[in-house]
Amino acid sequence: MPLFLRKRTRICKGLFPLFLVCILSCAGGEREIGGLLDRRARALAEKDIILYMSCISRDYRDEGRDFEYVRRNVSRYFSSLDGVEVRFSGRKIYLEGSEATVYQDVIMRIMAGEGNNKVQRGRERLYMKREKDGWKIRGGLYGN
């Protein structure tokens, strides 16, 4: 084998483990984010404010809203409803180191009293960040 091919082969062999680590960490990050979003969906369906807020970063900032605003707003929202059914589809996760942007379609059926059901459809864009205890939503809950 010519010398230039041997050097190229060694370089490729040296970069392969790095490439593999990058691929696996991206897949792991997407899996973790998917788990967080599934937990948020469960919190909505169960009207569980503690579980819901465990998905939100204490550093949440978006259009003048912060963590405490989200907590108060979601708490009021849950107490005003009889039930919520939510489905997400078309999820796309874009990872950039310790930050990510998630796009997903949402169909939410809101039940508030007899015969007072409403269906909302939309596309959601959430901003995420990796914190010490995992991925959290840091923005995007109120309008996109």
Image (cartoon, helix red, strand yellow):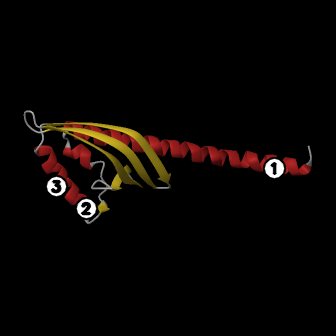
Q: Residue at x 64, y 47 (%)?
A: 19
Is residue 131 among what the camera can see? no
Q: Residue at x 36, y 52 (%)?
A: 126
Q: Position of residue 81 (x, y in %)?
A: 12, 41
Q: Residue under circle 1?
A: 8
Q: Nearer the viewer, residue 15 or 85?
A: 85
Q: Judge left or right: residue 132 versus residue 28.
A: left
Q: Earlier in the sequence, mark 2 or mark 3?
A: 2
**For the residue marked with disc 3, what is the amino acid?**
Arg
The answer to whether marks 2 and 1 mark residues whose Cβ atoms lie closer than 8 Å is: no
Q: Residue under circle 3?
A: 72
**For the residue marked with disc 1, what is the amino acid?**
Arg
C-alpha separation, residue under disc 2 versus residue under disc 1? 52 Å
Q: Residue at x 88, y 51 (%)?
A: 4
Badge 1 element: helix
Badge 3 element: helix
Q: Earlier in the sequence, mark 3 or mark 1?
A: 1
